[in-house]
Amino acid sequence: AFAVMPRQQHLLQTLALWLALAVQAIWAGPKINVLQWNPHWQCFVWDEQDCKGEAERQANEWLAALDLDFANLIEFADPNFTVPSGWTALTAHCDHDLVSLVYNDRRWRADPSPAARADGCLVASFNGSAPDRPFVVQRFERLGSNESTAVSNATVANGTNVTNVTGVVNVPSSVIVIGAHFPHPVTVAGDLPDEQFAILRVPLQAMMNSTGTRDVILIADTNLAANIPSTSIATSIGMPGTDIVSTSLERTCCFDVDFRFTPEFTFDRVIANFGVDMMTKVLIEEPIPAWAQQVKGSSKGAFHKPVQGAILWEHVHVSPRAPGSHHQGLMITLAVALSLGAIGLALLLLWGFAPPRLRGRSGSFRKKDQVLEDSDSDDDDDDSGSE
């Protein structure tokens, strides 16, 4: 097997990004794009192979490339880290732990009123210990004209009830977004006690009552395994309504357990009480890049895979689109173009893995017997190596 070198690893990441863009382009209607990522503190403190710099570069690249509305970046413990122009970060600290709720400030405005912002720690200080596990709750208002999509017999949640509609559905003009880092439950497969959920539930309820906004997005490293459904989390924090959409439960944790723990550590989630469906994309798959593999002595870092969720206003299997979706042809063309580009990149990647003699020296064809002789020579070389 060929080792994955840094150049090929970068090409793999680019290929994954192109595929994500191709998949995303297929759904031409309005959507809210959200990212949840916790590369874990070891990435920034141990910082082996420039993990800190790579994580920051990757996060900022995704903000623009994936046209993100909101991102919850956890434990980005670099005081010099800044998001690019067009995005703003709201940060909450609890001792060494921190969350940065990043929003697209060309599309959303953070409501500056005191009733529209709350932050705190999900774990209070106890017997001299420092508080831990921060959260941010913020109301946002959409800027510019409201996006809408034509739908036919779709089920739409508006935060308080669910209705079947035919016609035009508007993207919410305001939303409440929660960025949080949950504590671990007492047992691996357990849930958090209600008094811990209440620390989020109380300010959320107060904000909904004072502002009238009832559409809510939770972006969190929940530290809850696959046996705890997202609907249960939504209920526990007080999301109104019963029609909950969520990213699929992906095994995002963690490098230190080789992403193979049972029950599945599906910690990183995006949960909302509006929209009719959610597209999910894990942005870094295994094998994770070398820079993300933090190892110090016998200890390994707990790197999480990043998860993108796109809140949709039509089920992903809806076909065809209702009248008025005039961008569909353009989006399909774009998706095909991106897919072809990704295939081309994959071929270049495979070509880069091939031994030099199999790639040829001058672009001319060699005789078949010469190719066979070179192939045998390559096999002998491989057998004599250390890897």
Image: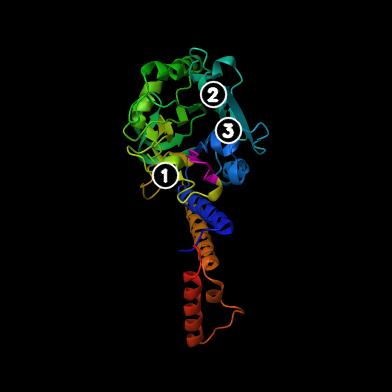
Q: Which quadrant: the N terminus?
A: bottom left
First in sequence: mark 3 vs mark 1:
3
- State the separation of the CA atoms marked 3 and 2: 10 Å
Query: Can I make out residue 252 in this image?
Result: no
Q: Determine the image quadrant of residue 75.
A: top right
Query: Can I make out residue 86 in this image?
Result: yes
Residue 353 sits above or below residue 119 on the image: below
- State the separation of the CA atoms marked 1 and 2: 34 Å
Q: Which residue is mark 1?
A: 258
Q: Which residue is mark 3?
A: 103
Q: Residues within 10 Å of mark 1 (few under 14, many from 20)?
A: few
State the SS at label 1. Answer: loop
Q: What numbered label is drawn on residue 283?
A: none
- State the separation of the CA atoms marked 3 and 1: 31 Å
Q: Which residues fall within the magenta stretch? A: 292-303
Q: Are marks 3 and 2 in contact (CB under 8 Å)?
A: yes
State the SS at label 2. Answer: strand
Q: Residues within 10 Å of mark 2 (few under 14, many from 20)?
A: many
Foreground of the two, 295 or 36: 295
Q: Which residue is mark 2?
A: 138
First in sequence: mark 1 vs mark 2:
2
Left/right of residue 82 with respect to residue 14 in the rendered view:
right
Name the amino acid type tagged 2.
Gln
Residue drawn at the location 41% of the way across and 20% of the way down: 197
Foreground disc of the pair 3, 1: 1
